[in-house]
Image (cartoon, rainbow, N blue to C red):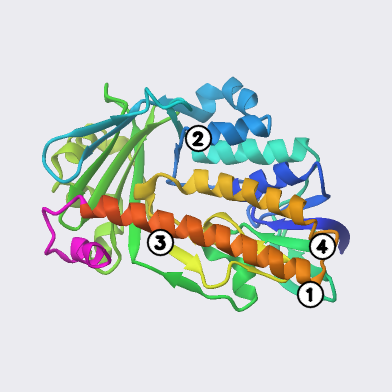
Amino acid sequence: MTKIETDILIIGGGIAGCIAAISLVNTHTVTLIDKLEEPKERIGESLAPAAQRILKELDLLESLHSHQEQLYIQNLGMQSYWGSEQVHIVDHLRNPDGLSKSLDRKGFETFLRKSAVERGVHCIWPAKLKSSSLNDTTWHVIATSEKLEEQHIQAKFIIDATGRQSHFARSQGIQRIHIDKLIACWVTLPDTEVNTMSTITATENGWWYSAVIPNNKRVIAFQTDSDLIDKATFKDLDSFLEFSKGNLQITYILGKNKTNITFHGVVAANSTRLEQITGKQWVAIGDAAISFDPLSSQGMFNAMANAMQLKELLVMSNIVNHPDTDIDKQFQKMYTKQMESIWEQYLYHKNTFYSAEMRWKNYPFWKRRHHSL
């Protein structure tokens, strides 16, 4: 058994958790745990240009640039077949923050984990949350691992950064609200195309997405509601390829690389939020608090921005060192207000974008999204 005392315990070593840890380590003692020994492959890879401001503020941008070939490629923009058969192009050439970045998501998370260790964050992985209890003003957390001895952690404050699963919040009895049933089935393959822009193509039952990522690879995904497509369709690569024949652009790309495609299966992609995103001496951030439809391309940036906003609020309130009841209530009120504002803006933009596609307005996938307008 290992005993640890820390100001802040962050549960979840993904993007939100690592950014929060790196931003807070100069003002607090920070412990970061994750149930995975190393990050896993993920579909999300589009990093919005504005994220560079955060990386620069944390003195991470130069180091990221030095690993460019392995971690990211510049993305000129997006071409979309949305609302009509005519292609619509949105580029980032005039964006003051520069181009967006198409990441090796696993590589980027590994980079952030390494940066957290180098900055002095006490990192423990693999370590899975087993139990937690608040005694007076101190959280007592037990984390277990097959490779490490049991970790007994005393923390003044907890940050749940465990993604859509929101493990800590759920252990406190907090439920998630699901706005829709969106899922994504995805594959990766060698990139052989001259055009490196990302592509979105709407269809009657959802939409396709394609993007180039580092190491001459391409990701292709189809987004739909879980109850609209036979589950066997996304069971294996052969059924996925057969399904893709309904879209000319995607069929053209997949048809040239059939023997080199890696099938990753289905992941949740729906819009969700916690019923309660903060409580006594704890908060949820990133996907653990609110998760976005991948159509927004804002998931990673939101996780990073959320972590930075939380850091400012924690330092300003000094709640970690002075967990006074009145301070705690004010902190919860301010943080909740921040997150509600982000959620409302997200829903507005999500609804606006989906409403631009009316060719299949009477099909269930689109009807559900237009009905919410």
Pointer 1 or 2: first along the chain: 2
Boundaries of the magenta span = 356-373
Give the quarter of the image for residue 151. bottom right
Give the quarter of the image for residue 57. top right
Callout 3: SS: loop
Instruction: Give how far apart the Cα atoms at labels 1 and 4 are.
Output: 9 Å
Q: Nearer the viewer, residue 326 or 177?
A: 326
Pointer 4 or 3: first along the chain: 4
Residue 224, percent from left and from top: 27, 58
Residue for badge 3: 271
- Residue sitting at the far bottom: 173
Relative horizontal placement of residue 231, taking residue 298 as reference (left or right): left
Relative horizontal placement of residue 259, taking residue 124 as reference (left or right): left
Residue 257, percent from left and from top: 26, 33
Instruction: Give how far apart the Cα atoms at labels 3 and 2 are.
Output: 22 Å
Residue for badge 2: 50
Residue for badge 4: 155
Instruction: Give how far apart the Cα atoms at labels 1 and 2 are.
Output: 37 Å
Residue for badge 1: 134
Amino acid type assigned to the residue bearing label 3 in the image? Ser
Amino acid type assigned to the residue bearing label 4 in the image? Ala
Pointer 3 or 2: first along the chain: 2
Instruction: Give how far apart the Cα atoms at labels 4 and 3 are.
Output: 31 Å
